[in-house]
Amino acid sequence: MPDFPTPRDSAVSAPVAHRKALNLIGGLSAFGLATCVHAAPAFDSDSTWMLGDWNGTRTELAEKGYDFNVDYTGEMGSNLHGGYDHDRTARYSDQFGLGTHLDLQKILGWDAAEFQLTITERNGNNISNDRINDPRVGGFTSAQEVWGRGQTWRLTQMWYQQKFFDQKLDIKVGRFGEGEDFNSFPCDFQNLAFCGSQVGNWVGGIWYNWPVSQWAMRVKYHLTPELYAQVGAYEQNPSNLDRGNGFKLSGSGTQGAILPIELVWTPKLNGLPGEYRAGYYYSNAKATDAYKDSNGQPAALSGEAYRSASSKHGVWLGVQQQITSRASDNSRGLSVFANGTMHDKKTNAIDNYVQAGVVYKGLFNARAKDDIGFALARVHVHVNPAYRKNAEATNQARAVYDYDDPSFLPPQDTEYSAELYYGVHVTNWLTVRPNLQYIRHPGGVDKVDDALIGGIKVISSF
C-alpha cells in the first residue's frame, strides 16, 4: 500500500509547498521582467542600442564575455561670421566605429585578461580647412574634431591586456594610440582644442591620436587604489598616417620610438570623482629644426637643409574634478577641467598650450541626463618664435611682403578658441550637442577675421 500523509504531515507540508510555488512564480516573474528589460526592441529610448537587444541575444553574449558595438559620430560646422573666406556654407564629417571587446576570463578562463578590436571609417569635409583658416598655412585647431588623419578605413585598436598581482600590474600590448592611455581626455566638445589628448594635437607628427594605431606596449602599476604610474613605448612611424596604410602591420618606415611616462591620481574629494595627470614624453627619432640650418643660419635664406636634432620631448598636466552634486546624485553636478602642454622649442611649431572649462550634467530636473559645457583655450600660447621667424625669412627669400600675394607665407602667432554646447540626451543611444564656437585669429594669423561657427555633434550607438 502506498504511504499517505497523516493530517499532521499535511498541515506541515501545505505551507511549504505553497511557499515553493510562490517562490517559483516569483522567480519566473523576475526572469520574465529581466528578459523584458534586457530584450529591448529597436529604437527603445531606454535601450543602450538603437537596434535593440536582438531579443536578449546581445545581453546574453555580453554576460558570456562577448561585447559588440557599432558607434557613430557626426559633426556639422558652418561659418556664421568671419574667417578667411566669408562665403557662407556648411561642412559635414563623420566616423563609424565597429568594435568587439572580449572578456577572456569568461571565455577562456584566463584570469584578468581581455582583448579589444576596433575598426573605424571616416568621411566628409571640415569647415576649418577652406573657410576658417588661411589655406597657405592651415590651422592649429579644427571646428570638427572627427575630421582628419585621412578619410578612410583604419585598424584603430587591436590589443591584449593582462593584469597581475591582484590587478595591481596592468600590461597592454598590440596596436593602439598614445592618447588612449596617456594624456587622455573626453571628447564631448566639437572643437579639437577641447577634445582628446592635447599632446597629440600639437605634436601630431610623432604622437598619433585616434583613429591611428601603431605597435605599442603600456605598463601600468597601481601604487595605491587611487594612484598609478604608467610607462609606454610606441612605434614612431609616419607611414601609419598615410591614407593607404590604415591596416598596415609591418614596421617598415619606423623612425624610432616615443616613450611617455605618466603619474595619475584619481581621488574622490567629498565623495566626488577627480583625475589629475602629469606626464612627460621623449622621442628618440631625429627631429627637424624649425628655423636654422646646420651652420646656424636661417635655412629659408641660406637654401640649406634644416638641421636635425637627435630627439624631441615635452610635458603635460591635466585636471578634471567634479565639485558639486545635485540632490545627492553624483551623476549630476558641476565639473571643472584644465589642460596644459609644453614642447621642444627648437623642433616644434607650437611651444605650449593651455585650456580650461566647465561641464554641468543634469542642470534641469526634467532633463537629468543632459549636459552643458563651456571652454576656453589659448591654443599654443604663441607659435614657437623660431617657427614665426622661419615664415618671415621665407617671405624675405621670395621677396614677397604683401599678405594678399598668393605666394606670401603668413607668420603665425596666438590663436584663441571658445566653445559653448548643450548636450541633449535624446535617448540612451542618442545624444545631440548643438554648439557655438568662436575663434580669434584663426590659425594664429591676425589678418584673418575672427570666426563664429555653428555646429552640431551627434553621437549614437547602434
Image (spheres, rainbow, N blue to C red):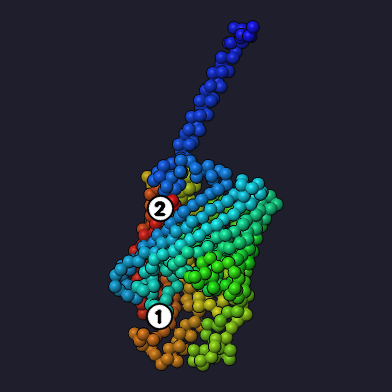
Image: 23 above or below 189: above
Using the numbered discs, state the Cα–Cα distance from disc 1 to disc 2 in whole angstroms.
36 Å
Q: Is residue 20 visible?
A: yes
Image: 326 above or below 451: above
Instruction: Determine whether the residue tagged by mark 1 lies in a helix, strand or loop.
Output: loop
Q: Earlier in the sequence, mark 1 or mark 2?
A: 1
On the image, the x and y values in percent for residue 18 come to: 54, 18
Query: Residue tagged by mark 2?
Result: 431
On the image, the x and y values in percent for residue 347 come to: 55, 79
Which residue sits at x=51%, y=93%?
302
For the residues labelled 1 and 2, say whether their Cβ atoms are less than 8 Å apart. Answer: no
Q: Amino acid at mark 2?
A: Thr
- Crowding near pointer 2: few (<14 within 10 Å), some, many (20+)? some
Q: Is residue 228 visible?
A: no
Residue 136 numbered mark, or none:
1
On the image, the x and y values in percent for residue 317 come to: 56, 65
Instruction: Say which of 71 and 247 sits in front.
Output: 247
Q: Amino acid at mark 1?
A: Arg
On the image, the x and y values in percent for residue 422 come to: 38, 56
- Crowding near pointer 1: few (<14 within 10 Å), some, many (20+)? few
Image: 131 above or below 11: below
Instruction: Say which of 238 and 410 sits in front.
Output: 238
Which residue sits at x=58%, y=67%?
249
Which residue sits at x=65%, y=58%?
171
Tell me the quadrant of the picture where the N terminus can be found. Answer: top right
